[in-house]
Image (cartoon, helix red, strand yellow):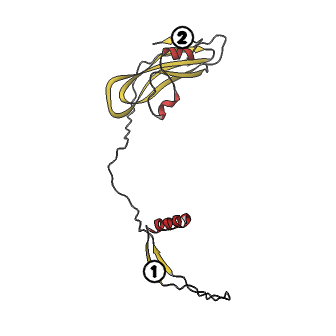
Amino acid sequence: MKIKLITAAVAMIALSGCDVDKTRSGDMPSVDVDVSADAGRLPKYEVEWADVDIGTTTETVEVPEVVVVMEEKQVEVPYMDVNMPDDDSPKSKRTIVVEAEVAGNMHDLQIEKVYAKDRRLFVVSKLKATDKSLEGKTVRVSDRIVINAPDLDLQHFIIGDKPRGDWNNQYTFVANESDLRKRTKGAREIYSR
């Protein structure tokens, strides 16, 4: 009984979105006791599905608008020349850049220290919110340091709250100096701003 009710309910739901017009009447097959039957004729229906129009409409939505204006300026950038003991490897000059994408309030981002341990450099920056509102915009803040050194591994830490967004996933964010010391244990400070 339950199966019949469920089947009837499903049929009603499936047909509720359709307009069905009967185009021919039907007859039930006639049955003879000796099991011979007249073929009969099933009713014929023409089913029209809902009429669907595809197009476009104009809606007012908020979309990000990015305008980047790049211009060259000469600025003073911290510079480090690193000579490794007992290492005659050629040195190369490279610019280490730290960037963060922030929203809400403007932030200051500054490379504050560089630590060294074995063949690894730890670049430490601080990210701190200011009182200036960004009025719903997202901006990218950055700082840089130039290092002339042999090929060394580099790990970048940012002290501060990690802003939302995929852009900020390339750095390790730590809450404070204590957390940083645990991660750079045994490293020697070679630069401080």
Q: Vertical placement of 42 versus 181: above or below?
A: below
Q: Which residue is mark 1?
A: 22
Residue visible at 39% across and 35% down in the picture: 68
Quarter of the image where one finds residue 164: top left
- Are there few (<14), some (14-19), or many (20+) residues within 10 Å of tag 1? few
Q: Which residue is mark 2?
A: 189
Which label sits in the foreground, 2 or 1? 1
Quarter of the image where one finds residue 163: top left
Instruction: Estimate the x, y position of residue 139 in percent, counting from the top left.
Output: 39, 31
Residue visible at 58% across and 13% down in the picture: 185
Residue visible at 49% across and 65% down in the picture: 9
Instruction: Estimate the x, y position of residue 35 in percent, counting from the top left.
Output: 67, 86
- Are there few (<14), some (14-19), or many (20+) residues within 10 Å of tag 2? some
Tell me the kind of residue under disc 1. Answer: Lys
Instruction: Estimate the x, y position of residue 15 in percent, counting from the top left.
Output: 46, 69
Tell me the kind of residue under disc 2. Answer: Glu
Residue visible at 47% across and 74% down in the picture: 47
